[in-house]
Image (spheres, coloured by chain):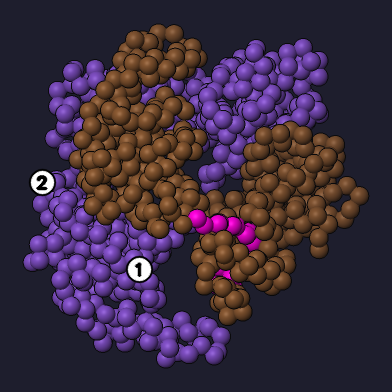
Chain colours: A purple, B brown
Amino acid sequence: MTVRAGIVVTGTEVLTGRIQDLNGPWIADRLLELGVELAHITICGDRADDVEAQLCFLASEGVDLIITSGGLGPTADDLTVATVARFCGRELVLDTELEARIADILRGLMSRLPAGVDFEAVLAANRKQALVPVGAEILEPEGTAPGVVVDGNAEGKPVVIVLPGPPRELQPMWSRAIASAAAQRAIAGRTEYRQATVRMFGLAESGLAEALREAESHIPGFAGLEITTCLRRGELEIVTRYEPRDDAAYRALVDFLRERYPRELFSEDGALIDEQIAALLAGRTIATAESCTAGMLAARLADRAGSSAYLAGGVVSYSNEAKVDLLGVDAELIAAHGAVSEPVAIAMAQGALSRFGADTAVGITGIAGPGGGSDDKPVGTVCFSVALTGREPLTRTLRLPGNRSDVRERATTVAMHLLRRELLGLD
Amino acid sequence: MTVRAGIVVTGTEVLTGRIQDLNGPWIADRLLELGVELAHITICGDRADDVEAQLCFLASEGVDLIITSGGLGPTADDLTVATVARFCGRELVLDTELEARIADILRGLMSRLPAGVDFEAVLAANRKQALVPVGAEILEPEGTAPGVVVDGNAEGKPVVIVLPGPPRELQPMWSRAIASAAAQRAIAGRTEYRQATVRMFGLAESGLAEALREAESHIPGFAGLEITTCLRRGELEIVTRYEPRDDAAYRALVDFLRERYPRELFSEDGALIDEQIAALLAGRTIATAESCTAGMLAARLADRAGSSAYLAGGVVSYSNEAKVDLLGVDAELIAAHGAVSEPVAIAMAQGALSRFGADTAVGITGIAGPGGGSDDKPVGTVCFSVALTGREPLTRTLRLPGNRSDVRERATTVAMHLLRRELLGLD
């Protein structure tokens, strides 16, 4: 049985994009783990009519569970609990015990504030946080705002979980919310799903679409696989959701993709290229020599905790003088081939090897644009060289699409993949 | 007159949080600039029924304009155009001229791909992108996917602007979309607003909230200012929306903030610190010496087109050996004070000056965590030195909050602000 859910994110600052919504994606992940299908996320400002319209929309779509985030504070524009109560046809009542517990929390917080704040005024403002819909289950606050779970089934409505907006409050309250009797009733009997991710590089999305159409006619049980594909930073992410009984079909799909694209399929277990590179660099020392990416590769290699075990450093040789002075590239080489050329990329990587005493190095030199292109070397032309001591360097020239920022980011990703191939001894 | 709009973001990868939605917030900003009120953002997966349900919901809420993003690709799960056509009661027809233009684009892209890709198969997969609703205005593609604008008014529906999902395609298509006859009809007669942005650095959001409460009681016409504040990368962004008649109140607010926070207010015209630094570096040559940020500052300085005029390069000296060998930092200095210390930051910046022959340099060394902290130098401790030839260096040590990624990004921003102060000769 499919259990469907919807998420209502409230808050004018989120709707207008001043604050990035972190709750929708976080709750989406939790629902996925639970095997609950997320149908809709809706975002609106702090207006009761808009919040109620979204609740009605989700109910009309037949979701079993609605989760709201935000609008539980003490101020006038915090109106989610009252709106959910009206939506479910419940009265709001003052829970005096909850009010006392909130007062205790506030007393603790106030002791840290400067004197002169009127405690009674604060209590009055917070009294509305102790107003709960009749019959609701209360979720004890992490900050000062309690959540509630309202089982709207008797009124022909979904179960509604009402949570506060700040992620540091919402997240610890989630497990209690989902353990509530009403939430458990809503998600009972759901089908359990598996989800698995495969990653490819160097393949167009349309090529994959074609391959998937072919797979559809070859693989028994293919219809049971819910496949979504996504192109990100030049990589294709293929996420498949399926019931355990369709495991054989999923394995057949991965076999099919591996056989069809042995070069492009680089991750069968969902691992990112960054994780693979980190593992492959164990026991090695790497240095970078970057021109157009200007430090993006070094910064990416340093993203992971513990990267100091293998990252010696790098040179950003943006000017020709820096290539000569810092990396020992021969000025005549630059004069003969141009700064963006394979001989210069090779010399940059070799310079990084020797200057940092590393055993692994990557050289990148390219034209990120918008200026600097020519007929011979248009904007997007990037030369790469991966050098491992004791081996011939791997050198490639590519023309990368997009604007300045795209070219630089894509070049960084290409460098990661060339590095992987070389460290694995492929090609 | 209030014109209301809704945004429909489609894509299973966005709904499930695997990709952060950048289009909703971006379009929200554009609508704000236009004086159009955004009522709802809704997000759903690549399911025609869910997309159509959201379109119907927004129509029932009486919005004048709907903008969709995503679902315009060549694969089977890209179904937005067909769904919008059904929603507006329009047939889909093949636009053969558009098909030819898409084929031209694909031919250009294919020439960069390895041989062996079946061009005819790609064309077939992309044919569906040339299917458009009868009577729709076509928005020429930035990638391969055209957008459309459908005026649903005759059918009692809103005007619908259909845009592709990738922000680098959606954003350049926006101005053409909003200039279309149908979109102009939808937004005609709206109240015009001004929007202005002020930026501050080194001030807590609660401090600003306090100041704004004070401003409220001092400034006549303050109530006409719609102020939203947002803390981002350690900078406070204060965006104010107001009708032209409230211009004097807005100018009074900026005067108030400048007088109250002369040090923290760094931008009165909305210019980013990056733009200010680029202008201040005109005629100069800068080099970086980075440890914990590992190239992020150099990469940020290279973000802007034309940065080669002032950026010589940088050294990522992640290891102590790199600090000594590449930047000439005295090994005994590291032994005496530790790699994360002001003397080492100063020596790194001086090394960058001399190695790159630059007149401006920044040295950064810090503990990004999660490991490596001590009682004396906890995680988040970062030492900065800004060196201009012929001046005493500006040196600071800060403790930055957050996780590894936060610390590194914040350190990069702090470096930009220290550089600005030094280039302006402040302090």
Q: Is residue B291 left or right of residue B208?
A: right
Q: Is residue B137 left or right of residue A89?
A: right
Q: Which residue is mark 2?
A: A1
Indicate whether B178 appears above or below B387: above
Q: Residue at x 26, y 23 (%)?
A: B93
Q: Residue at x 28, y 53 (%)?
A: B62
| B208 in magenta | yes
Secondary structure type for disc 2: loop
Q: Nearer the viewer, mark 2 or mark 1?
A: 1
Mark 2 touching mark 1, by CB under 8 A? no
Q: Is residue A62 left or right of residue A232?
A: left
Category of crowding for the residue at label 1, using alpha-carbon neighbours closer than 10 angstroms: few (below 14), some (14–19), many (at least 20): many
- Toward the top, the furthest residue is B116
Image quadrant in which you'd find residue A45: bottom left
Q: Chain of mark 1?
A: A
Question: B351 or A202, which is in the foreground?
Answer: A202
Q: Is residue A215 left or right of residue B388?
A: left
* Residue B399 position in % (x across, y down): 64, 62
Residue A349 can be seen in this image: no
- Whether labels 2 and 1 share one chain: yes
Instruction: Choose the circle earlier in sequence order: 2 or 1.
Output: 2
Q: Which residue is mark 1?
A: A71
Dot label at residue A300 = none
The amino acid marked with disc number 1 is Gly
Indicate whether A191 appears above or below B106: below
The span picked out in magenta is B192-210
